[in-house]
Image (cartoon, grey):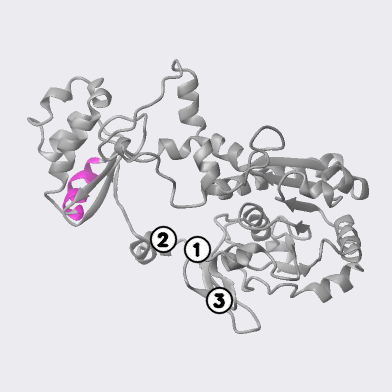
Amino acid sequence: MTAENELPLSGLVVVDMSQFLSGPYCSLRLMDLGARVIKIERPDGGDLSRRLYLSDTEIGGDSTIFHAINRAKESLAIDLKNPEDLKALRTLITKADVLIQNFRPGVIKRLGLHYDAVREINPKIVYASISGYGEDGPWVKRPGQDLLAQSRSGVMWLNGDESQGPVPFGLAIGDMLAGAAACQGILAALVRRGISGKGSHVETSLLEALVDFQFEVLTTHLNDGRRLPKRSNVRSAHAYLSAPYGVYHAADGYLAIAMTPIPKLAALLGMEETLAAYSDQPSTWFTSRDEIKALIAGHIATKTIDEWLAILEPADIWCAKVLNWSELLESEGFQILDMLQTVTREDNVSILTTRSPIRVDGQRPKFDRAAPRIGEQSAAIREEFGL
């Protein structure tokens, strides 16, 4: 890579002591922006996510999720119970720009690698800590796991139809959002270090990230007499938004319809008489949203998605077909983004995965190296850094 197209974080060394998803997602974003990520792993088994299977597919002995979130990183095998290995790790930290850890609170201090200790050997380091629930309070020692954090954050209670009970997201959103928040904090701290020369300690947690994720609706709740919202029991998509906001079953699939005035939608759907009682009373679009949405749902089911799109899109109605993954991957809108890449390794491992969501100077970073084997770069890293 030449200086002209060098990525913004090229030349920075990130020591990633985290595992599972939140910390590795953070270091993945830094890697995609040009940083060199050295992943610290136990010699006997490595990152626990190597065995975190989302399906019965494994590649090169590791789970697909490990490959997805650790592509193009390097692995240094370190036994944290071995004094010589700990000494080598401290030496590496003195030469690093960023350190990321997501141990349970208290563990990193017992290892002597908490921020205050690390700052003594490397005052300029940007140190990031990700936990489940922060560093204090009654939940500190509880498992910082995504489903449990969703449960405690309110986001699971808010999701789904009123009659369903709590509905968890089908993704590890707490991990991903916490990793993204840590990455933002690291980048800001690196900017400050470039100005003042001072390092920083960036902290976040799954709970904090999930609360922030809900800032819009929580702000409404906090300033609206703290009344709990009632989810729609018909095609719910947002607890605070009125009809027709939701997802409707058409004759051959699902159609999402966002914010749209009921009179305009009624005219286009041919439902003027059916929805007449609600057309001139915007307040009922919320108070009677289940009744309105039930009527719309019954009508939407009579035609195909393409038939409805041909009517609604020319009228600038905000609507879209709900795509599954196969349909997404086959769509021109996805393909033109060029967000997939094949990464490989010397032991014939090859995996098709995603690329960075960030473009720099018009270019999306692309890498061809797969996730490392445990300790794959140990010898080379030890020689380079004198460990």
Q: State if disc 3 and disc 2 touch (CB < 8 Å).
A: no
Q: State if disc 1 and disc 2 touch (CB < 8 Å).
A: yes
> Given the image, on which type of amino acid does mark 2 rest?
Phe
Residue 305 locus on image (x, y percent): 20, 53
The kind of secondary structure the magenta stretch mainly shows is helix
Most extreme residue toward the left is 273
Task: Quickly name the residue at label 2.
Answer: 334
* Distance between mark 3 and mark 1 Cα atoms: 21 Å
Determine which of the numbered discs, if any, sits on residue 59 in the image: 3
> Given the image, on which type of amino acid does mark 1 rest?
Met
**Which quadrant of the figure contains the N terminus?**
bottom right
Q: Earlier in the sequence, mark 3 or mark 1?
A: 3
Direction from residue 300 to residue 246 in the image, left or right: right
In the image, which residues are magenta? Answer: 305-315
Task: Quickly name the residue at label 1.
Answer: 339
Choose between 80 and 207: the one closer to the eye: 80
Residue 219 locus on image (x, y percent): 50, 24
Label 2: few (<14), some or many (≥20) within 10 Å?
A: few
Q: Residue at x 37, y 29 (%)?
A: 240
Q: Residue at x 34, y 59 (%)?
A: 324
Q: Name which quarter of the figure residue 62 lies in.
A: bottom right
